[in-house]
Structure formats: C-alpha cells, structure tokens
Image (tube, coloured by chain):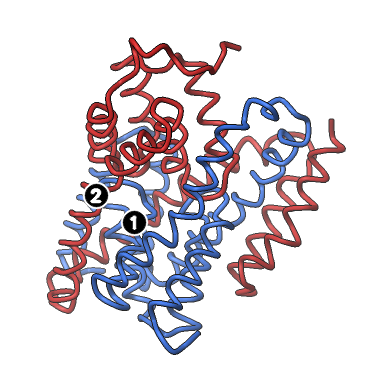
Chain colours: A blue, B red
C-alpha cells in the first residue's frame, strides 16, 4: 500500500468512510493516526492547521480530507481523498433511502442507532483530545481553547466570531 | 407520522433549484450545515414538513459518514432519483471545494510564514474549544441520566482511540456490538 500515495489515500479513506459514525469529527483521530503516525504524511502541527482551515471554511467539516489529499498528492490527491471519503457512504445512503420505510420503526434499527451514540461521543471526545494536544502547546492557547469551549457550550454564538477572536489573539504572538 | 411518499410532480423542485438551495446551505454553514439545511428546506422552501425532515435526518444519522452529506443524498434522491441526489451533492460540495482548494494552495505556499501560522494557531485553539463544546453538549444528557451503559462505552471508546491509539475499525468492531446489545436489552 506504500507504493502510491493515491492508492493509500483511496484505501484508507474509503474504509474510514464506513466507520465514521457521528460524522467527520468522529473520524479525526483515525485520520491523525494514519496521516501523522503511520504514513508520516505531515507533522502534528500541519494536521492541526488543516483541521482549523476545514472548520473555519464554509461547508461540511469532512472537507479536511480534501486538504489532506492535496497535501499528500496535489489535485489528484484532493480528488481521490474526497471521493473515497464520501463515495461509499453516498452510495449507501442512496440505496438505504429507498428501503428506509420498511425498517425505520424496527426495534433493531432503533437499538443500533441508540447504541452508536455513546461510541460516537467517545470518538469525538478523542478528536478533541488529540487536537488539543497539538494545538494547545502553551498556556495561552489552552486558555483560548477553554474559553471557546465555555462560550460554545453556553451560547449559540456563530462560531465564525470565535474563530476570528482566536485568529486575532494568535496574531499577537502569545500563542 | 406523515407519509414520506414522493410529493406530486407539481411541487417537485427542479434540479437547478435543488443545486442552488444546497449551495446556499453549504456556504452559510459554518461549523455544521444541518441547522441551515432545516431552515432552507422546511422554513423557506417548504419542500418538506418538519416531520419529513426529522425522518430524513434520522436516516442520515443512522448511516455512517457525515450527516449533512447523507442528508443531501436522501433528500435529492427522494425528489429526483439519482440526478436529484447528484444535484444536491454537487450543490453542497461544489462551492466549499472551490474555496478550500484555494486555501490549500495558499497554505502549501505560505503556511510557513510567521504571521499566517500565528493566526492559524489561534484559530486552531478556538476550533478545538468548539469541538469540546460539542462533546459537552452530547455528553450532558448521557452522563446526567441515572445509571446507563452510555458513559462506560463512551469512556472505553475514548481511551481506545485517544490514549491507546488503536485503529478505529478495531475499537468500533468491539464496542459497537456491545453498546447496541445494551440498547436492545434495556427496552
């Protein structure tokens, strides 16, 4: 799998796409493990930068895979990573949508959905942990993270304001 | 529960209208596009009732992968089959892809510049904070309820992935069946 980065991107993201219960944010630790620890495609810092760019851009957060793909193999990498991450789940969604009425009220369907919630919670928590370790490399950054967490938890403020405040504070050079 | 049957052709939106609606949703959706999708489809366009939206949303959550992408496929296919799904998906993905490609090129060229990397470290710190807020909102109802298996499963998933660095498919294959079994027998 190490021969061509395109094949590696396609393989990893297609597999990941089917395990991303709870959305893109639940898949962050696995992306980090592959991109930083296993394949050494990028540094911890670069991964955290890409997460920030994806979060601060409009559109689905899963777009981080496009950034990773571009970093690894240019435009071809961006295309392959995006299609691999979204293709399998889109095809699945298309076909399941047609038979959904038949099992939407089935007890097993409800049990599966309820059972997956704690798993995705743990995975998203792991995302926050992995990213905090690379982003909060000093006390000021950790304070910004903590304050943003409080504001985000307690209010419905547009996240864009928090990104802007974070960016301006970053510019001061304390972080 | 209202019938989720396909609407009559009279009020079926055109492919171009579906594309435009999803493009607009994706461009307004910072930090999660689903609330915007609801506003657009239920409140502004009236393409789905609130119940129909909730049902399509439940299906999107049931499926693996990003919820809003699943939702665009479910919505598009219900209104226009495969072309409808493609139109919704293209609307949702096209504009953000163009923006993010520009950002990727800028980052590749200027990512090392001191000023930019300072700004990015501030944005990253804030983005991580928001993620923690999401975790808090998800965890609160689960951890505050009287004893249930949820917190234990969540903590095991966290330890397996964040601390032990085990591959996601393995952690998932072990924990998901256990958690689903708990949910099954709790009824």
Question: Mark 2 packing: few (<14 Cα in 10 Å), some, or many (20+)?
Answer: many
- Percent x, y for residue B113? 13, 77
Residue A129 point in image, percent of width and height = 51, 63
Residue to which mark 1 is pinned: A63
Can you give x and y, in whole percent of width and height, for residue B106 in the image?
14, 68
- Dot 2: element: helix
Tell me: residue B76, above or below residue A55.
above
Q: Chain of mark 2?
A: B
Residue at figure coordinates x 24%, y 48% from the top left? B94
| Residue in the image at 75% along x and 37% along y | A111
Q: Quadrant of residue A143?
A: bottom left
Percent across and percent down for residue B158 are 63, 61
- Asked if the residue under mark 1 is in contact with the one under mark 2, i.e. CB atoms within 8 Å, the reply is yes
Q: Nearer the viewer, residue B109 or B135?
A: B109
In the image, farthest residue toward the right: B185
* In the foreground, A124 or A35: A35
Q: Crowding at label 1, few (<14), some or many (≥20) Cα neighbours within 10 Å?
A: many
Give the quadrant of residue B185. Answer: top right
């Amino acid at each position: 799998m190490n021969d061509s980065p395109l094949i590696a991107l396609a393989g990893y993201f297609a597999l990941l796409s089917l395990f991303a219960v709870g959305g893109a944010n639940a898949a962050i630790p696995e992306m980090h493990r592959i991109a930083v620890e296993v394949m050494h495609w990028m540094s911890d810092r670069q991964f955290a930068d890409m997460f920030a760019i994806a979060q601060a851009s409009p559109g689905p957060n899963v777009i981080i895979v496009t950034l990773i793909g571009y970093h690894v193999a240019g435009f071809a990498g961006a295309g392959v990573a995006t299609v691999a991450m979204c293709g399998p789940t889109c095809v699945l969604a298309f076909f399941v949508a047609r038979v959904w009425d038949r099992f939407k009220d089935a007890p097993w369907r409800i049990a599966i959905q309820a059972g997956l919630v704690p798993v995705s919670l743990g995975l998203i928590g792991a995302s926050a942990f992995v990213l905090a370790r690379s982003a909060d490399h000093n006390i000021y950054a950790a304070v910004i993270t903590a304050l943003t967490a409080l504001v985000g938890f307690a209010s419905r403020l547009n996240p864009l304001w928090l990104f802007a405040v974070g960016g301006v504070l970053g510019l001061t050079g304390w972080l | 529960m209202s019938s989720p049957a396909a609407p009559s052709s009279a009020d079926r939106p055109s492919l171009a209208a579906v594309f435009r609606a999803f493009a607009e949703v994706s461009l307004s959706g910072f930090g999660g596009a689903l609330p915007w999708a609801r506003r657009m489809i239920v409140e502004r366009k009236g393409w789905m009732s609130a119940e129909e939206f909730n049902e399509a949303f439940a299906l999107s959550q049931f499926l693996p992968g990003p919820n809003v992408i699943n939702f665009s496929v479910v919505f598009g296919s219900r209104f226009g089959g495969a072309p409808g799904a493609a139109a919704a998906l293209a609307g949702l993905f096209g504009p953000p892809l163009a923006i993010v490609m520009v950002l990727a090129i800028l980052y590749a060229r200027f990512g090392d510049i001191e000023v930019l990397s300072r700004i990015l470290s501030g944005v990253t710190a804030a983005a991580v904070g928001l993620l923690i807020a999401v975790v808090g909102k998800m965890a609160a109802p689960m951890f505050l309820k009287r004893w249930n298996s949820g917190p234990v499963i969540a903590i095991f998933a966290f330890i397996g992935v964040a601390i032990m660095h085990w591959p996601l498919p393995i952690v998932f294959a072990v924990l998901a069946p256990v958690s689903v079994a708990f949910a099954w027998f709790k009824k």
